[in-house]
Image: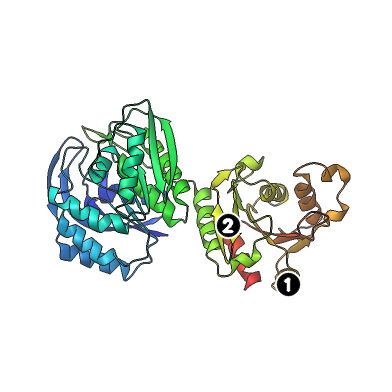
C-alpha cells in the first residue's frame, strides 16, 4: 500500500511531510512525499517559510504518479495560491481518494496559508476532496460562520460540503468542554465521535489524524470506520508525546497492530477480486486472523459485521474487532489447538466444483457431516463449529487447507479456507476459484 503526502516541510518532524511519513510508516503504509513549502521552525518558535515553485510542485506530482500506484493522497500545507493551482492542475482528473487537511496556522505561530490563497483553496481543492478535515477554527474560515456549539459545527459541515467535498469531518477540540466531539458529515448523514479531553500541549496532532485517515481510506475502510480508527490512533499518539526540544512536545506514533494491518489489507484485496460476489454465501463472509496461542475468540480479529454481496460486487459492512467473529473464529480456535501455525480463515459458499478443484490442486481437504452431530452439540450455540472442526481433522497429521460440510436442515453448506496468514488464505482461495 502506497500513500502520498503533499505538504510543507517541518524540520522539527512533528508535523508536515515528516510527521505524515512517521504516521504512514507506523500504520504499515509506504509513504511518498511532495514538498510545497520549506519552513524554519522548532518547538519554540516559527521563524520563516519559503514556497516551492509551482513548476517544481507539478514536476514532483507527475514524477510520483507516473511511477507509483498511489492508494490515497493527503494534501496538507499548500501555502500559496500558485501552489494550489499547480496541485489542482495535476490532480483534478485523478480517481485516487484525496484527504484534504486545511493547514492555515502552525501551533508555533506561523502563517501557513497566505490570505489571498483561501479563495483558491475553496474553489480548487475542496471540490476534489474525498474528505476534508478542518478543526473548529479552520471550519469557521471555510464556512464563514462563528462556531460556538455542536449545532454550529453541523451547520459549518453542511456549508463546507456544499463547496464540493464528499465528506467533512470537523474536529471539535477547540470548543470549551470536558469532552471532545468530532462530527463527520458523509453524504447527508451525520456521525458523532466523542472522547474525554486530554491534557495536550503538543505539536502534530492534526497532521497525525489526517495522515492516519489517509491510510485507513487507502485500506478500503468506509469513512465512518476510517475516522474512528484515525481518532483512536491520534489519541494514543497524543498520550505518547515526547519532549525532544525545549518547547512543545511532539506526538509519537507507535507501531501498528501487525495482525490488524495484515487482515485489513487482505480484506481489501478480497473485495477487489473479480467476480468474488459469486462465492459469498447467504450468511455472508467473514475473514479472521488470530494472535498466537489464542485462548478464546477474544484473541481472534474478525469483522464485527460481514463481507456482504451487493449485486455483482461485495461490500465490507462493519469494522475489524477482536472477538468480532464467532463462527469462523471458533473454527480457527479449534484448529490452533492441534496446528498452532494455522491462524487465519475465510468462509465461502459451498460448491462441489470448488472442492473437486481443491483436491486436484493437492490441497488438504477435510469434511464433516452436520447430520450426525450429537443432540447436545446441536442444541448449543457455537458448539457445532468446534465439534465439526474437531471431527474433520481427527487423526489428521497435516494442517488443513479446507474444511467443508454440506449443511443440514436449516443450515447452509459451507467451505472454510485456512492458512498461516490472511495472505496465504487468499493464495489458496485464488487457486480454487480461477
Q: Is residue 283 above or below residue 197?
A: below
Residue displayed at 40% across by 53% down:
215
On screen, residue 316 versus residue 9, left or right, reads: right
**Where in the figure is residue 277, as x and y percent of width and height?**
61, 65
Q: Quadrant of the C terminus?
A: bottom right
Tell me the element at label 1. helix
> Which element is circle 2 on?
helix
Assess disc 1: are there few (<14), some (14-19) or many (≥20) residues with their C-alpha within 10 Å of its C-alpha: few
Q: Nearer the viewer, residue 57 or 81?
A: 81
Contact (Cβ within 8 Å) of mark 2 with mark 1? no
Residue 263: x %, y % from top left: 54, 53
Q: Could you give the CA–CA distance between mark 2 and mark 1, rounded to whole angstroms?
A: 23 Å
User: Mark number for residue 353?
Assistant: 1
Q: Residue at x 33, y 56 (%)?
A: 129
- Residue 37, label in figure: none
Q: Nearer the viewer, residue 195 or 313?
A: 313
Q: Position of residue 164 (x, y in %)?
A: 32, 55
Q: Nearer the viewer, mark 2 or mark 1?
A: 1
Q: Is residue 430 left or right of residue 356?
A: left
Quadrant where the N terminus sits is bottom left
* Location of residue 382 (image quadrant): top right
Q: Residue at x 66, y 40 (%)?
A: 296
How busy is the neighbourhood of tag 2: few (under 14 within 10 Å), some, or many (20 plus)? many
The disc placed on residue 422 is 2
Marks 2 and 1, the one that precedes in the sequence: 1
Can I make out residue 79 in this image? no
Residue that sits furthest to the top in the current view: 178
Q: Position of residue 240 (x, y in %)?
A: 37, 35
> Where is 392 relative to 19, above or below?
below
Q: Nearer the viewer, residue 417 or 84?
A: 84
Residue 212 can be seen, yes or no: yes
For the image shown, how many numbered marks are present on the structure? 2
Amino acid at each position: 500500500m502506497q500513500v502520498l503526502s503533499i505538504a510543507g516541510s517541518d524540520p522539527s518532524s512533528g508535523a508536515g511531510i515528516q510527521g505524515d511519513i512517521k504516521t504512514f510508516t507506523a500504520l504499515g503504509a509506504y509513504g511518498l512525499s511532495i514538498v510545497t513549502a520549506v519552513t524554519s521552525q522548532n518547538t519554540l518558535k516559527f521563524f520563516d517559510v519559503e514556497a516551492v515553485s509551482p513548476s517544481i510542485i507539478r514536476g514532483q506530482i507527475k514524477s510520483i504518479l507516473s511511477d507509483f500506484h498511489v492508494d490515497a493522497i493527503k494534501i496538507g500545507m499548500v501555502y500559496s495560491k500558485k501552489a494550489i493551482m499547480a496541485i489542482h492542475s495535476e490532480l483534478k482528473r485523478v480517481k485516487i481518494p484525496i484527504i484534504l487537511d486545511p493547514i492555515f496556522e502552525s501551533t508555533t505561530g506561523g502563517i501557513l496559508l497566505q490570505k489571498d490563497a483561501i479563495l483558491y483553496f475553496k474553489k480548487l481543492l475542496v471540490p476534489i476532496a474525498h474528505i476534508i478535515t478542518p478543526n473548529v477554527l479552520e471550519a469557521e474560515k471555510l464556512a464563514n460562520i462563528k462556531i460556538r456549539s455542536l449545532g454550529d459545527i453541523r451547520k459549518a459541515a453542511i456549508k463546507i460540503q456544499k463547496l464540493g467535498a464528499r465528506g467533512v469531518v470537523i474536529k471539535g477540540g477547540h470548543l470549551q468542554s470536558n469532552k471532545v466531539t468530532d462530527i463527520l458529515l458523509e453524504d447527508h448523514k451525520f456521525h458523532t465521535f466523542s472522547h474525554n479531553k486530554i491534557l495536550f500541549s503538543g505539536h502534530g496532532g492534526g497532521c497525525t489524524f489526517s495522515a492516519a485517515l489517509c491510510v485507513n481510506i487507502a485500506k478500503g475502510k468506509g469513512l465512518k470506520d476510517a475516522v474512528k480508527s484515525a481518532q483512536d490512533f491520534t489519541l494514543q499518539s497524543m498520550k505518547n508525546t515526547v519532549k525532544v526540544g525545549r518547547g512543545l512536545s511532539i506526538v509519537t506514533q507507535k507501531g501498528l497492530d501487525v495482525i490488524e494491518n495484515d487482515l485489513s489489507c487482505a480484506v481489501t484485496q478480497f473485495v477487489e477480486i473479480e467476480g468474488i460476489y459469486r462465492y459469498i454465501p447467504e450468511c455472508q463472509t467473514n475473514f479472521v486472523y488470530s494472535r498466537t496461542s489464542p485462548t478464546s475468540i477474544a484473541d481472534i480479529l474478525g469483522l464485527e459485521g460481514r463481507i456482504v454481496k451487493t449485486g455483482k460486487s461485495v461490500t465490507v459492512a462493519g469494522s475489524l474487532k477482536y472477538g468480532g467473529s464467532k463462527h469462523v473464529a471458533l473454527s480457527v480456535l479449534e484448529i490452533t489447538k492441534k496446528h498452532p501455525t494455522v491462524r487465519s480463515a475465510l468462509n465461502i459458499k459451498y460448491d462441489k466444483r470448488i472442492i473437486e478443484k481443491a483436491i486436484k490442486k493437492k490441497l488438504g481437504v477435510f469434511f464433516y457431516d452436520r447430520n450426525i452431530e450429537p443432540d447436545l452439540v446441536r442444541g448449543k450455540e457455537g458448539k457445532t463449529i468446534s465439534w465439526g472442526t474437531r471431527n474433520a481433522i481427527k487423526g489428521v497429521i497435516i494442517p488443513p487447507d479446507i474444511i467443508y460440510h454440506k449443511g443440514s436442515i436449516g443450515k447452509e453448506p459451507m467451505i472454510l479456507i485456512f492458512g498461516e496468514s490472511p495472505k496465504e488464505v487468499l493464495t489458496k482461495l485464488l487457486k480454487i476459484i480461477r
